[in-house]
Amino acid sequence: MNTLSKTYDPKSVETPTYKKWERSGYFNPDKLPNAKKRKPYSIAMPPVNVTGELHVGHALFLTTQDIVTRWKRMSGFAALWTPGTDHAGIATQILVEKALRENGISRHQIGRKKFLEHVWTWKERYGERIVEQIRRLGASCDWSREHFTMDRGLTVAVQTAFMKLYDDGLVYRGERVIHWCPDDQTSISDLEVDYHEEPGTLWYLRYPIVDEQAFIMVATTRPETMLGDTAVAVNHKDERYKNLVGKRVRLPITHRIVPIIADSAVDSSFGTGAVKVTPAHDIADFEMGQRHNLPNISVIDKFGKMTIEAGNDFQGLSVAEARGLILQLLQEANVLDHEEQITHSVAYCSRSHTVIEPMLSKQWFVKTKPMSALALKALKKGDIKVVPERFTKVLTGWLTNIRDWNISRQLWWGHRIPIWYCIACDEPVASITEPKSKCKKCGNRAFRQDDGTLDTWFSSGLWTFSTLGWPASTNTSTGKPKKGSDLERFHPTAMLGTAWDIIFFWVARMMMFSTYLLKEVPFKTVYLHGLVLNAEGKKMSKSKGTGVDPLVMIDTYGTDALRLSLIVGTTPGQDFRISEAKTAGARNFCNKLWNVSRYVLSQPSNVKRQLSHVPPRTLADRWILARLNETTSVVTHHLDQFQFSLAVEALQQFLWKNLADWYVEINKIEKNTALLRSVLRQYLILLHPFAPFITEAIWAAMGESGKAGSPAGGKKLLMVEPWPKTKKISATDKRSAVDFKKFQRLVTGIRNLKLHGNDNKPLEVAVVLDDAGLIAKLTNVGFGHITGAGVAISGVTVTAPKDVVVKFIAWRERERAQLTSYIANKEKLSGNEKAPAQIRAQVKEDLVVAKERLAEL
């Protein structure tokens, strides 16, 4: 048998262990033992940005997906976890442009072709960084099937999907209000908009009613947009303004006459209940304008400057400058009634942190209703299970009320929109390559391609099937997957794991694409984890100094400790906190496992190889096997329900409270080394998906024999060891559990009698029991025929000197009184509905522990 070092050093274990796994080829389901007999089970890794570094969000979803992949692989499945990276259109272009500017170069100076060469060079230089960081986390994904969203095959998938949607009439060019980033000079998706609650001003303006000595008061936070107002709106149910609907007002400054309209979208409780309508610079106003046939007047351009339509006095001014001038003119005209300080939501570009400018723009859109209808149907049929289930309702609501999707971006890096325009008449033609035919509208033969690229979410929306070979792996005649292809074997994927905050932007879009293009769901289960918060409950941010760097935590405490700290205490869909103290606690657990394993492997044994099962000889043997069997059942059940925290907690409890605290100590006396090794062997299998590095290292030291010349050097790898099956609980097992619990209480009671009744000094007691010798060694007390007082412990009377018993009982009663008061206070707090959910949940856990302790006393 090999031996383990005195202390566990993750750095000396993790790199060589991961290389051993990769050399084995077992990350590839086709190379697993008995590969042809295994049922497929697949997961598509959410593609991480090539611009990024590993953060705790990555670490969490990678850990949960790796847990499931390893468990399914050990359970006999052909487990495929497909890795990949995303080209991250805006983020990557920003970084490369920044690098060019540092050298005094702009992308417009060098042109599109040369700029893209710079991007690809940058990607090759830095793109592997995030992949290596994923490896550090122990991800057992199939690197032979790694993909990048701009690989040739995935580019063909994007082009094929676009052409299909275009031919079906779902892709169209339209003029609508979109989110525009003046700094990045592109339209952006909803996901790339951050909303911040900020102090602001609400200005109340008097709009005079035409032909009347009256006015209507409107409130606005953006007076500069009044230059583009084309109406004033009130809610159709608002009794205050019923007599004004249909009348007209004269706009201050521009003197344009616009109507007063009634619309259900107006919030009567905001300001005065009457709002100015600027269809070209507000999404809600644009939709209102469409319903009432209002004209669109664009007064702010893509650079955040006022346009000629804003008027000669304002053209060229910045938004801030225009606002100042307008407020001055309103005051001079006695139109500004008063102002109010408020807190309101301001939209920022998540990349550049620039204030978003909603503006009217001609873009390419996807009609989402026909696609969302199919996704909704699959969801309602139960073809997709959402964990936790409450998000099913959230997803259903979004798919029901979905808007058309702006898919075009004004970027050079990304999948170029396969649209060509006739140079003579601007008629668009959808084509992957330049059209060879004449323009259908004017007969011209010259075309130019659209300068824009597709939203990054377009390509990632195809991810589950584009990474499995679609469309190349489908039969052109039937549209069905080719026999034996990855697409046929592994799609739909079994499970998707991601954070709840991108359920709309990615999860829903994958559902729409897959149900529309493939007529099947992209995955059977969606597991949504919470967001990782820091110790103070704040969202992680490196720039604000509130982040926890997972790579630093790995360097300090080891990968397994980080993985465990990300899992323990979490609930599906619930945000949770992580701290260095929590990771340090997980490291302590790993050290405990290492030390227990060192003891086990240090014991002499006549058994030539580790056995998976050794028959029990004693009550302690029967008890530990029963507890191990129960733990196996509990862990398997929780894995099946995606309750990863509960599974780890069961494993931690078994190590601390069963194996280390009791069975190892008893084994030092009763010496059943073969059974002890057998128990450790099964425990390592159960823990492996959660803490793969330390378990594989201990497994190797146990000396499991395998085929000569195997990647593990003649030893079996733990990562492909069969998952243990739960045995039926017998009457003997049940009786053993009850008997051993009494034994535990008796031992604990005698230890407490010595500690709290005799100040931990040498003590002799009398007890009539078959296991007196074992109890004496575990409690370190003398057993003799003494006279004194008796105390009942677990149904057995222990006789000790009277003064010891009196002092012990006094201690016990004090403890009981304190615990009873503590429990009463906690129960009051647990019933407080105003307390945060996380606090109430923690109080309930505290109550369980306290009541168990009270029962023990």
Image (cartoon, rainbow, N blue to C red):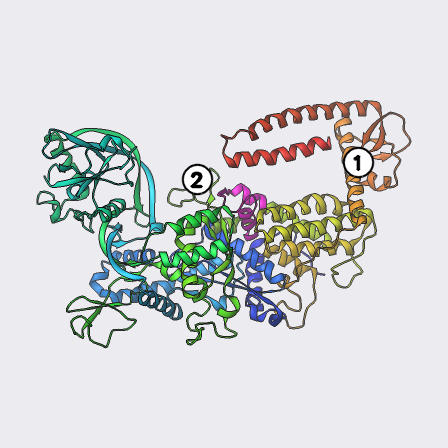
Along the viewing direction, whichever of 685 and 294 lies nearer the viewer = 294
**Secondary structure type for disc 2:** loop
Q: Residue at x 51, y 36 (%)?
A: 837
Magenta extent: 558-586
Relative side of 221 to 738, left or right? left
**Residue 842's quadrant in the figure?**
top right
At x 59%, y 60%, the residue is: 72
Residue 667 visible from this viewpoint:
no
Which label was assigned to residue 598? Answer: none
Q: Position of residue 88 (x, y in %)?
A: 36, 58
Residue that sits furthest to the right in the current view: 785
Residue underneath mark 2: 538
x 43%, y 62%: residue: 514
Quarter of the image for residue 816 reads top right
Q: Amino acid at mark 2?
A: Lys
Q: Confirm whether the magenta stretch covers residue 690.
A: no
Tell whether 153 sits left or right of 690: left
Q: Secondary structure at mark 1?
A: helix
- Total marks shown come to 2
Q: Is residue 400 left or right of residue 96?
A: right
Picture residue at 43% right of the left edge, 50% below the top: 396
Q: Which residue bears the numbered disc 1?
A: 746
Q: Earlier in the sequence, mark 2 or mark 1?
A: 2
Q: Which quadrant of the rendered structure holds the C terminus?
A: top right
The verdict on residue 585 being magenta is yes
